């Protein structure tokens, strides 16, 4: 079965194509994307949506060429239906509907957060992991319990990626900030920052205000602030992830989201996993960041489990949470 997936929850417009027909062969046939960026960072929803309209045809053409397929060869069209920015989601849903109508292909709506987890299970050997999902807008700890992917902990304000980007913008490091912060952090020393974990949830607003004050004071080195933001924010993530592992009695930690590309975060997670006899799994960067192969892959799993949307029901659900979805495709 060949599934074409469309990602359009935020900055990224992507088309991925997956195939599960032949055992042992590569399942991801294409994973193409084009990302909306501005010099200062941030996202203007209507402009990001315009970007997606501008690039959708060429991204589709490239993906089909890489997979050496025609649309006629595709069996199912999947699209990111939830959660995300309404303006952006709408473009993906519209594109999916028009392809479905023109080529008479069934449609499947996919949850973006669960897609991060399922692509991780495909491209690593993780079977039943706790997902530490750290992206621009999302920061969640998710695990499978009782037929649902449940959120065990999450940010109470901004996503960790947006938090890093906002700090980096104030320091004049450009956008996206995360990768630049990682480089500066290598030469830094620790200065104390507010650490904020509340139960299983965390927030970043207090730390951001404190950092803004430190930047304004002019008394701190860039390197020290970059080192300290990573040490503090990542320690918060590791603490919550460890408690989720203990609570769910699971032995695997899977990383997802763009911030999970960070080598220091990976090192801290690995140390924690080793100390408690668990294993850490990190997909290749291409599958950590927002991508459409993950939408296609979850679409395939859902379609095989009987999911199918009528074209008039192929809407968007910007605020749907992962634990509102019944996981029909897992047998355990
Ligand atoms: P996503 O929303 O999953 O596509 O991830 C985008 C976010 O990942 C942005 O906020 C980036 O700043 C962040 N990011 C990317 N690479 C790194 C890195 N090496 N370290 C920290 N953050 C990163
Ligand atoms: Mg994401």
Image: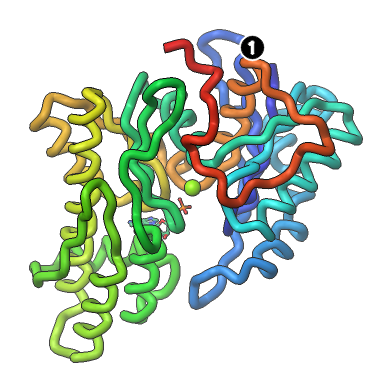
In this rendering, the answer to whether 298 lies above or below 179 is: above
Quadrant of residue 297 within the rendered picture = top right
The answer to whether 312 appears left or right of 260 in the picture is right
The answer to whether 264 appears left or right of 94 in the picture is left
Camera-side residue of 297 and 188:
297
Camera-side residue of 8 and 21:
8
Q: Is residue 264 visible?
A: no
Quadrant of the drawing holding the N terminus: top right
Residue 96 spot, x, y in % from top left: 77, 40
In this rendering, the answer to whether 276 lies above or below 203 is: above
**Furthest residue in direction bottom, as rendered:** 217
Name the residue that disc number 1 marks.
21
Q: Secondary structure at mark 1?
A: loop
**Furthest residue in direction right, as rendered:** 102
- Residue at 23% x, 77% y is 211
- Residue at 63% x, 42% y is 80
Q: Residues within 10 Å of mark 1 (few under 14, many from 20)?
A: few
Residue 121 spot, x, y in % from top left: 42, 25
**Furthest residue in direction top, as rendered:** 23
- Residue at 24% x, 89% y is 216
Residue 153 spot, x, y in % from top left: 31, 45
The answer to whether the beta carbon of the residue marked 1 is less than 8 Å from any atom of ligand 2 is no
The answer to whether 76 appears left or right of 134 in the picture is right
Q: Is residue 13 visible?
A: yes
Picture quadrant of ligand 1: bottom left
| Rendering colour mode | rainbow
For the image, the number of numbered tags is 1
Quadrant of residue 126 within the rendered picture = top left
Quadrant of the drawing holding the C terminus: top left
- Residue at 62% x, 31% y is 296
Residue 269 spot, x, y in % from top left: 20, 41
């Amino acid at each position: 079965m060949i599934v074409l997936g469309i990602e359009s929850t935020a900055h990224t417009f992507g088309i991925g194509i997956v195939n599960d027909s032949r055992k042992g062969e590569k399942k991801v046939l294409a994973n193409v994307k084009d990302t909306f960026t501005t010099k200062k960072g941030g996202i203007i929803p209507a402009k990001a949506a315009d970007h997606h309209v501008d690039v959708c045809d060429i991204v589709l053409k490239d993906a089909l060429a890489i997979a050496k397929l025609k649309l006629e060869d595709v069996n199912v069209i999947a699209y990111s239906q939830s959660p995300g920015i309404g303006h952006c989601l709408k473009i993906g849903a519209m594109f999916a509907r028009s392809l479905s109508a023109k080529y008479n292909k069934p449609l499947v709506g996919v949850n973006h957060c669960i897609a991060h987890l399922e692509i991780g299970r495909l491209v690593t050997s993780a079977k039943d992991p706790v997902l530490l999902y750290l992206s621009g807008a999302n920061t969640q700890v998710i695990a499978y319990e009782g037929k649902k992917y449940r959120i065990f902990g999450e940010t109470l304000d901004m996503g960790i990626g947006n938090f890093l980007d906002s700090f980096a913008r104030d320091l004049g490091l450009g956008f996206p900030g995360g990768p630049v912060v990682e480089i500066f952090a290598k030469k830094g020393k620790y200065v104390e920052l507010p650490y904020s974990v509340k139960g299983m949830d965390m927030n970043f607003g207090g730390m951001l205000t404190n950092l803004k004050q430190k930047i304004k004071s002019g008394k701190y080195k860039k390197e020290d602030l970059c080192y300290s933001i990573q040490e503090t924010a990542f320690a918060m993530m590791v603490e919550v992830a460890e408690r989720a592992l203990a609570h769910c009695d699971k032995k695997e930690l899977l990383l997802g989201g763009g911030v999970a590309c960070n080598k220091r975060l990976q090192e801290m997670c690995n140390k924690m996993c080793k100390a408690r006899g668990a294993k850490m799994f990190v997909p290749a960067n291409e599958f950590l960041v927002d991508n459409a192969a993950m939408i296609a892959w979850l679409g395939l799993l859902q379609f095989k489990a009987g999911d199918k949307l009528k074209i008039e029901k192929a809407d968007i659900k910007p605020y749907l949470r992962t634990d509102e979805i019944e996981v029909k495709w897992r047998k355990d």
